[in-house]
Amino acid sequence: MRVLIVEDEPKLARLLARGLAEEGHAAAVATTGEEALDATAAARHDVIVLDVMLPGVDGFGVCRTLRARNDWTPILMLTARDTIDDRVNGLDTGADDYLLKPFVFSELLARLRALVRRNLGERPTQLRAGDLCLDPATRRVWRGKTEIDLTAREFALLEAFLRRAGDTLSRGQLLDGAWDIAYEHRSNVVDVYVRYLREKIDRPFGRRSLETVRGIGYRLRNDGA
């Protein structure tokens, strides 16, 4: 893996770079948000480890700018913040996973491997359920001829549903598919984002395609009805 570490704590940055090197990975370090944006413009990385609290442009700003550039390199955010609002904010800016400080290096490494595996997976040209269409390449969604504006996290959750349209998915499966966050399994973040999705892909069109399966999770009807 080619990893970009964006961390302003010199000791932690050195430890992460050394640990990754010992595992056979290449690691570059940026200490500010501006350095991170320059580094991503100059070279391609397989995954980015991004601290939230940075001097100048913070981690949220870096993530938002990268996604606006159509740079979809997987991002693992690091933070000492432990509130659901902070985690939702990070994910909404386009992060793929979230890890709280302090953490165990082996867990960080496992999460990075999972993100890289997921990013390398084969992507179909478009995903469909009835007249609901999602294009992974352009990050666009339509219902019929109407384009729907989704946040990065709403898009990831809808993509997880569309890849298994018609199947009942547990909250854990949805977290694994759209978040890769093991410790979130006790939170209501999936329920919150399902509600957001319904307000955008169903209710304006008089549809009920996103169904609740009591005691299990949720299902997207594969006919889009």
Image (spheres, grey):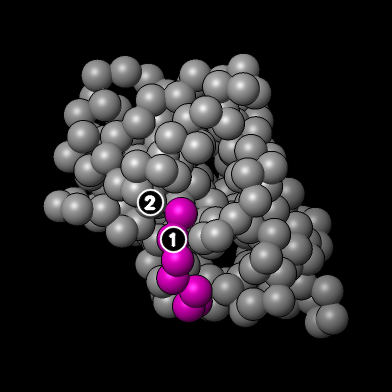
**82 part of magenta stretch:** yes
| Mark 2 lies on residue | 51
User: Could you say where residue 184 lies in the image, as x and y percent from the top left?
Assistant: 65, 68
For disc 1, the neighbor class at 10 Å (few under 14, some 14 to 19, many from 20) is: some
| Mark 1 lies on residue | 79
Asked whether the viewer can see residue 58, the reply is: yes
User: 103 and 199: which one is in front?
Assistant: 103
User: 88 and 110: which one is in front?
Assistant: 110
Query: Which amino acid is tagged 2?
Result: Asp
Q: Which residues are magenta?
A: 78-84
Report how far apart the C-alphas of labels 1 and 2 lie in the structure: 6 Å
- Above or below, 209 against 191 in this view is above
- The number of numbered discs placed on residues in the rendered structure image is 2
Query: Which amino acid is tagged 1?
Result: Thr
For disc 2, the neighbor class at 10 Å (few under 14, some 14 to 19, many from 20) is: many
Q: Secondary structure at mark 2?
A: strand
Q: Secondary structure at mark 1?
A: strand
Q: Residue at x 75, y 58 (%)?
A: 173
- Above or below, 189 against 9 in this view is below
Cβ atoms under marks 1 and 2 closer than 8 Å: yes
Q: Residue at x 71, y 69 (%)?
A: 185
User: Could you say where residue 58 lies in the image, as x and y percent from the top left?
Assistant: 24, 55
- Above or below, 168 against 108 in this view is below
Q: In the picture, residue 210 is in which quadrant?
A: bottom right
Locate the C terminus by quadrant: bottom right
Q: In the picture, residue 175 is in which quadrant?
A: bottom right
- Above or below, 194 against 91 in this view is below
Q: Residue furthest front?
A: 11
Q: Residue at x 38, y 25 (%)?
A: 28
User: Left of 5 or right of it: where is 183?
Assistant: right
**213 part of magenta stretch:** no
